[in-house]
Image: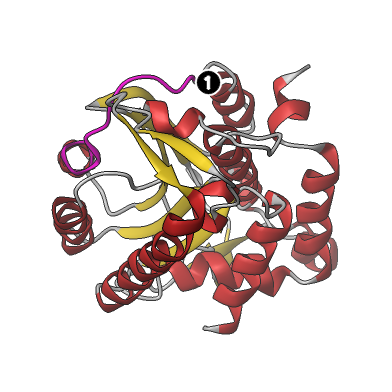
Amino acid sequence: MPAVEKYLKPELAAQIKRLDLRAQIIVRGFLQGLHASPFHGFSVEFSEHRRYAPGDDPKDIDWVAYAKTNKYYVKKFESETNLTGYLAIDLSRSMGYTYRQSLTKLDYSICLAAALAYLMIQQQDPVGLVTFDTKLGANLPPRSRRSQLPAILSQLTRLKAAGETDLAGSLVQLAAMLKHRSLVMLFSDLLGDEDSMLHALRGLRHGGHDIIVFHVLDEAEVTFPFKGSVQLVDPETGTSQAVSAADAAEDYRRTIEAYRGRLDKTLHESRIDYVPLDTSQPYDKALMEYLLRRRDRF
């Protein structure tokens, strides 16, 4: 199956296109809202006309003005900063897990990343891709040209979940790599040391970067649908433990809910977007709901 159809379904691409045509404020408000501070926007704003002069870019000529006046004018634009995005995807072994859904956590993250890459390129904002497990892996530098989407999709189709993870260390590496203020879109199940992860995320935020954390869990990791005696296996270390589902379910669900609640509160206080997801939610619907919620805040 071609990458564009596997990870960016035509119906989702069409939905985003229709959204952009029908209500551009949603997409633009989303992107502008991401950098309400420290940036003031990244769509180029028209300021005024002036006469064309040698050395001006012919693409800036206002042909409507020429048709009316028979003179060449160029549009003068206010200088604003483009949004540079990085899709940061966790490739640890645990991301390859699924209980009964058709998509693993990695597949689900790839679908979200493909849709966001498409959206950013539609908005002519550069977007790149980084992956990590115990350290940063693949690195596709940000570009805004149309050929960037096939390049990203080609990389996405080759991603595989394997090995352990060091989320905090990888985020520190990423922060050192970023030379300009950027939007980091993180896709991970966030399995690791909570304190070190939060410290690394705060460090990235304090560096002036905007961050969206897509916390992707499998449906079973949220609802604990198991019955009888269950052998729980750590996907990264291989250690296992037998438990009674009936005895463990309530405590487990309470623990997961508390963990998500702590992340939501702590990241919100650091002005980091936290988006808890599980693989039972259609990823296109989950993304659109997030875009709309983001739009409504600005």
Q: Is residue 156 above or below residue 15?
A: above
Residue 202 quadrant = bottom left
Residue 251: where, in percent of width, then height?
39, 64
Horizontal relation, residue 183 to residue 111: left or right: left
Residue 18 quadrant = bottom right
Q: Is residue 47 above or below residue 76?
A: below
Q: Residue shown at 67%/71% (left/top)?
A: 26
Q: Is residue 192 above or below residue 250?
A: above
In which quadrant of the rendered image does the N terminus lie?
top right
What are the residue bounds of the magenta stretch?
160-171
| Mark 1 Cα-neighbour bin, 10 Å: few <14, some 14–19, many ≥20 | some
- For badge 1, the amino acid type reads Gln
Comparing 2 with 31, the one in front is 2
Comparing 31 with 296, the one in front is 296
Q: Residue shown at 72%/69% (left/top)?
A: 24
Horizontal relation, residue 3 to residue 253: left or right: right
Whether residue 73 is visible here, answered yes or no, is no
Residue 101: where, in percent of width, then height?
68, 39
Residue 137: where, in percent of width, then height?
31, 22
Residue that badge 1 annotates: 155
Kindly state the secondary structure of the residue where label 1 is placed.
Answer: helix
Task: Indicate how the structure is coloured in the image.
Answer: secondary structure
Residue 83: where, in percent of width, then height?
43, 55
Residue 41 lies in magenta, yes or no?
Answer: no
Horizontal relation, residue 245 to residue 291: left or right: left
Q: Residue shown at 64%/33% (left/top)?
A: 146
Q: Is residue 100 above or below residue 276?
A: above
Comparing 122 with 5, the one in front is 5
Q: Residue shown at 34%/64% (left/top)?
A: 259
Residue 166 lies in magenta, yes or no?
Answer: yes
Whether residue 53 is visible here, answered yes or no, is yes
